[in-house]
Amino acid sequence: MPPPDDLVARAQAGDQTAFRDLYRQHAGRVYALCLRLTGDARDADERTQDVFVRLWDKLGSFRGESAFSSWLHRLAVNVVLNERRTTGRRERRVTLAEDPDTVVGAQHAAPLHLNIDLERAIADLPDGAREVFVLYDIEGYGHGDIAQLVGIAEGTSKAQLFRARRLLREKLER
Amino acid sequence: MNEQELHEAVSRLPKSIEPPRDLWPDISARINVRQWRRWYWVPLAAAAVFVVVMIGRSIKPTAWDVTALAGRPLIGTQRLTASGRLRVGDWLQTDDSSRALVAVGRIGQVEVQPDTRVQLVVARADEHRLALAHGTIAAKVDAVPRLFFVETPAGTAIDLGCAYTLATDSIGKGVLHVTAGEVEFQTGLRSARVPLGALIQIRPTTGPGIPYVEDAPAPFVRALIAFDFEQRGTRARAIRTVLALARAQDALSLWHVLQRVDPAMRGLVYDRLAALVPPPPGVTRRGAIALHSRDLEGYWTTIRRIHFRIMVLRGVRDIDPRTGRAR
């Protein structure tokens, strides 16, 4: 397997095979992020495509100042949040809980109830609370970063996190 | 559920979820359409051909070639004399005196050892999937990560570009031994990353144990197994033994332990790990103990790099297991 740096360089030079390999390496992480940020499997499918199409356009601006995976992760967060800001739509509610394989990946074979319940509960959170919870508790962003990414005050980010955790605990206790 | 339990549950969520369908054909088509808009009609032809080829390759069902290496393995109910084809849904079974070699599409091969039963589940260019019901296989794959999967009764081995031996009984108790590259073994609740020269024990319902290197001391391995698969009281004693016996070469084990111990123990595990292999810049104690993915991934990159240098340069250079530098 070529080293990741080599793949990025080849994709930057327009090599679609290398870009496809980058997609194969990173699709799982990007899809997980999109699924949790949107709370909707169909939206996650579209946003994952958007992220990689955007990546193809932006790849030339990657200078290697950070790890490629971190750079892509940030790009993915921006794509998902921009989409929500632009369209402001959230008509479709959660469909992912109907199909456990959609949530956890088809390759998982063991009992999944805990994860499924939690994933479902996260998807059911109000948009603002879910975004902050996913970015802070799952993805490890700080409140300062989240405030900048989502376009809210740091205090709002903390309040949304508190609200999200309370709602999740209540939901999982039922 | 209290805050701590919620935090624990969140930390166990998988970092990666494979999309339920292959998105590459759509992405590829969109990229090529955009290029057409820029460069007019010439790239359109190339893009159309590319998309057709990609979609054709991704959806075309295929069968894999099988060669008998010893005895007469069974494909379905047919005895294999020299060679044959394994189609999606077919079972390949060896008895105590037969072995077979299966070509994994165009990306590798699997040697099916005696007393083994495997099924071809998916045979596409973008997904190669076997089910190992029981027995032993030795796989060699030369491809980008996550193209080859082996399902066992306890979970799934995901190839990250590697060679490995996987053994399981019919209820899921087994061992994974990686000899090149890296393999991820996943269940819904646990996953383990196993680089070359490392093994994991696998158990039904609990899934993959903590990986350990081939030359790990026996008491260290016994303590890891007790930590992974025994009762809660035993686990507390086992973790103290693990920390006491761990060497710098065992950092990959401690990295996994950090994510599985009770939160109250994480500080101890982190401090021991950091004493053996110093964390890279940017990885914080607080972040690692909170299991923030950026800290964990950053640490893993360093541990993995050192481990690969030790393994690849074994017998050639003396590598410092704390830093990965030649001594």
Image: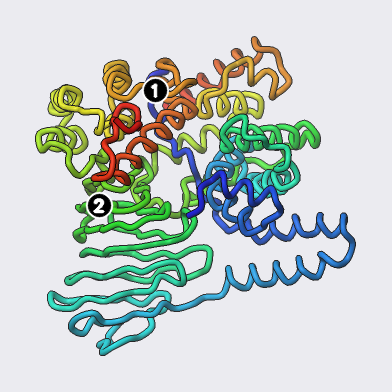
Residue displayed at 80% across by 37% down: A87
On the image, the x and y values in percent for residue B8 come to 38, 26
A56 vs A173, left or right, is right
Q: Which mark is residue B177?
A: 2
Residue displayed at 61% across by 55% down: A18
On the image, the x and y values in percent for residue B178 come to 29, 52
The image shows residue B77, relative to residue B273, as above or below, that is below
Q: Nearer the viewer, residue B309 or B99?
A: B309
Q: Say if residue B4 shows up in the picture.
A: yes
Name the secondary structure under disc 1: loop
Q: Amino acid at mark 1?
A: Pro
Q: Residues within 10 Å of mark 2 (few under 14, many from 20)?
A: many
Q: Which mark is residue B313?
A: none
Screen quadrant of the C terminus of chain B: top left
Q: Nearer the viewer, residue B243 or B58?
A: B243
Which one is earlier in the sequence, the residue at label 1 or at label 2? Answer: 2
Q: Say if residue A174 shows up in the picture.
A: no
Q: Which mark is residue B279?
A: 1
In the picture as drawn, the residue positioned furthest to the left comes out as B219
Q: Amino acid at mark 2?
A: His
On the image, the x and y values in percent for residue A135 come to 58, 27
The image shows residue B314, relative to residue B121, as above or below, that is above
Q: Nearer the viewer, residue B324 or B129?
A: B324
Q: Residues within 10 Å of mark 1 (few under 14, many from 20)?
A: many
* Number of numbered discs: 2
Q: Dividing the picture into quarters, in which one does residue B49 lie?
A: bottom right
Q: Chain of mark 2?
A: B
